[in-house]
Amino acid sequence: MKRRKTLALLAVGVGATVALTACGANSSSNSGSGGTSASAGAGNASNNGPKVGVILPETATSARWAGFDQPMLQDALTKAGMNPIIENAQGDDQKFSQYADSMLSQGVKVLIIAAPDGDVGATVERKAKQQGVPVIDYDRLNLGGSADYYVSFDNVHVGELQGGALKDALAAKPGAQVIEIEGSPTDNNATLFYNGQMNILNPLYQSGAIKRVATQRIDKWDNALGGTTFEQFLSANGGKVDGVLAANDGLAGAIITVLQKNGLAGKVPVTGQDASAAGLKAILQGVQYSTVFKPILQEAQSTAQLAAALIKGDTAAADSVAKDSSTDPTGNRTVKSVLLTPQPITKDNVKIVVDQGYVKASEICGGDTAATCAQLGIK
């Protein structure tokens, strides 16, 4: 992946947008319905703008899709004069394809997709291309696909931040034993995260500064499977581990549960990603070491800018938004992209996520974290 300087985005305050759904946005990660509209696929009846279809992947493994992406895309697309139809496939490939077929039959002018599986996403893109409907890969690049544009974060750098956090946490422990619990093998982002992690950790593995005990990619980012897999690795290693590379906060939470059972929580640094309320609270509690904050509002706004340009057939305007590029090795092509900048979060800077409105202080402060929040000025 080639990274260039990212476009300066619209200066829109996050607080007003997040206020639409901030209450409980990160506390209901195992629930969520499909559509934003009153009835599935109905769109926004009060909006006569051009229809744009959005299909998100799931809600079971990450709270972000329902808590942030869905309302922020709804808001950004509507403000840009479009009529968004937003559905969530809930991890079901067949449902994802059915939503796409329905949206194409309704005459959407642009399709924005975050597929639960890259192959399914690529298949949907071929159907859209046959009907002359441009596609934006949202957050995840579908390898072998034909999307016109891709909007995400610099995901190699996300992995570098994760690897860097673990490196820092284990700096005083030569020969530390590490277990890696990685993301889904069908999600290209998980590959990019891993590549970034290895940019930092491979030299340490090779030198013997730290030792990799085991590594496993977890199908569909399944938190329960991630916890079970970690527990098996931990048991096979005689109950010993000094650090855990967890690919996101959901997996980190499952791993921390296992560590608690074994009296190791708070003694073993665990990484994460997504800056979820659960992950941030775990950091404040001292049982998770780090996460990665990705400002999703910027992702939604960039997507809306691209969609508006594509509806007008203005590729020059679209290209002025997508100034980065990504490589699709399966399709042997380069995809014009927007690659936004992630930020590392440890206990010292949790306040950033709260101050920007992505998580409420009331979601992460209270009880055993109240004193820590007061010390950090989180309110």
Image (spheres, rainbow, N blue to C red):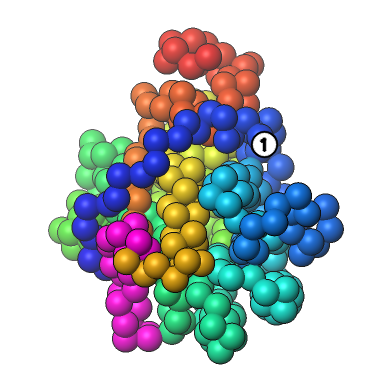
Residue 189: where, in percent of width, then height? 43, 64
Q: Is residue 268 left or right of residue 261?
A: left
Height in image: 36 above or below 142?
A: above
Q: Is residue 329 magenta?
A: yes
Height in image: 307 above or below 347?
A: below
- Residue at the bottom extreme, as displayed: 130
Height in image: 240 above or below 122?
A: above
> Toward which corner of the image does residue 370 lie, by quadrant?
top right
Residue at 74 percent across and 54 percent down: it is: 44
Residue 366: where, in percent of width, then height? 62, 17
Residue at 41 percent across and 58 percent down: it is: 152
- Label 1 environment density (alpha carbons within 10 Å; few <14, some 14–19, many ≥20): some
For label 1, the residue is 21
Q: Which residues are magenta?
A: 317-336
Question: Can residue 110 be seen in this snapshot?
Answer: yes
Which element carries disc 1, helix, strand or loop? loop
Residue at 47 percent across and 31 percent down: it is: 13
Q: Look at label 1 and name its amino acid.
A: Thr
Residue 282 vs residue 337, the one in the foreground: 337
Q: Is residue 277 magenta?
A: no
Residue 266 vs residue 52, the one in the foreground: 52
Quadrant location, the N terminus: bottom left
Residue 210: where, in percent of width, then height? 26, 52
Residue at 57 percent across and 35 percent down: it is: 17
